[in-house]
Image: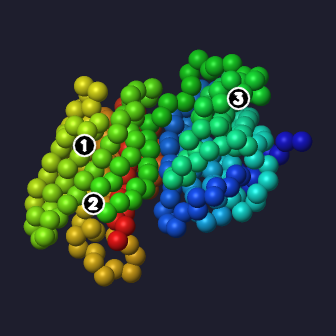
Amino acid sequence: MRRFPSCSGENGVQVADCSSSNASKNSHDVVTRVYRAKLRGCPCLITVTWSKNLLGQGLTVEIDDHSSNRSLCKVDTRPWIFSKRKGTETLEACSTLVDVHWDFSSAKFGAGPEPSEGFYVALVIDREMILLLGDMKKEAFKKTGASSAPRRAVLIAKREHIFGKKIFATKAQFCDNGQVHDLVIECDSGNRINDLCLVIWVDSNQVMQVKRLDWKFRGNQIIMVDGLPVEVYWDVHDWLFSTGAAAPANAVFAFNLSAEKSWFTHGQPLGEPLSFPDMFLDSKSSRNLGFSLILHAWKNE
């Protein structure tokens, strides 16, 4: 029998999850993706968060009301419950029942929290596939009996924590269904702090260089990706001036494919943006929002 979770508590449902032998030593091993969707004409955001800790992999699926800026429902996995690697839960949002299906029984993981293959996560409404993640698409459609929705969810934002000493690398897809690029951020100080130089590469092509970061530790610049302008924001203040702090320092980089600057105010440090994904909940400010990638870069000493 399906369970209908309460939307008033901190966690709607506790479901089982799959474990990984590659345990993370860092509590910031989290990747969050935000999708814009409509539930029976009601605009909403679907937030999918993958996490990893010493006990294994975790997954949270949350639906937020786009108009009232409030969380509607959440499916929250618990990595310390090692059972039910596949199953179904039903949420209620905007007076609509949303079936969440998952199968991690054959999932394979790399160094990060997201599975690389052998899995699916599917959100279905009235036998229409609203959101489908993973490579097991045939299995997902067969299991759910769903058909493709005329208006599927669209990826509008991603937040990720990346690690390195001088080089920080990840994959980036700046358009929904666009090309996946290799994105590399390189920061080398040489022998002195005033030699610090920031370089960004996309597919081995240098697209940006910032010298004298001791003076330019925050800023923004336009680069071109796939023939489209992408505004890059950077904030490396804590890398330079937080030595000896109790908590590890991280830099923050944001890549915004949009003509609007709707989620950072002038003069506000990039390290202190609006809470994520709350920055995408205001329907007026994010009406024409394209895609945003936010990277928290942590130095491995």
Mark 1, secondary structure of its residue? strand
> Residue beneath label 3, please?
140
- Of residues 226 and 279, which is closer to you in this image? 226
Residue 150, horizontal then vertical, whole percent? 59, 17
The total of numbered circles placed on residues is 3
Picture disc at residue 166 = 2
Closer to the chain start, of discs 2 and 1, is: 2
Residue type highlighted by circle 1: Trp
* 131 on left or right of 12: left
Q: Residue at x 73, y 43 (%)?
A: 105
Mark 3, secondary structure of its residue? helix
Tell me, yes or no, if residue 11 can be seen here.
no
Residue type highlighted by circle 3: Ala
Q: Residue at x 48, y 62 (%)?
A: 28
- Of residues 262 and 162, which is closer to you in this image? 162
Closer to the chain start, of discs 3 and 2, is: 3
Q: Residue at x 80, y 45 (%)?
A: 4
Cα separation between marks 2 and 1:
13 Å
- The correct choice, above or below, for 274 with respect to 238 in the image is above
Q: Residues within 10 Å of mark 1 (few under 14, many from 20)?
A: some
> Residue beneath label 1, please?
201
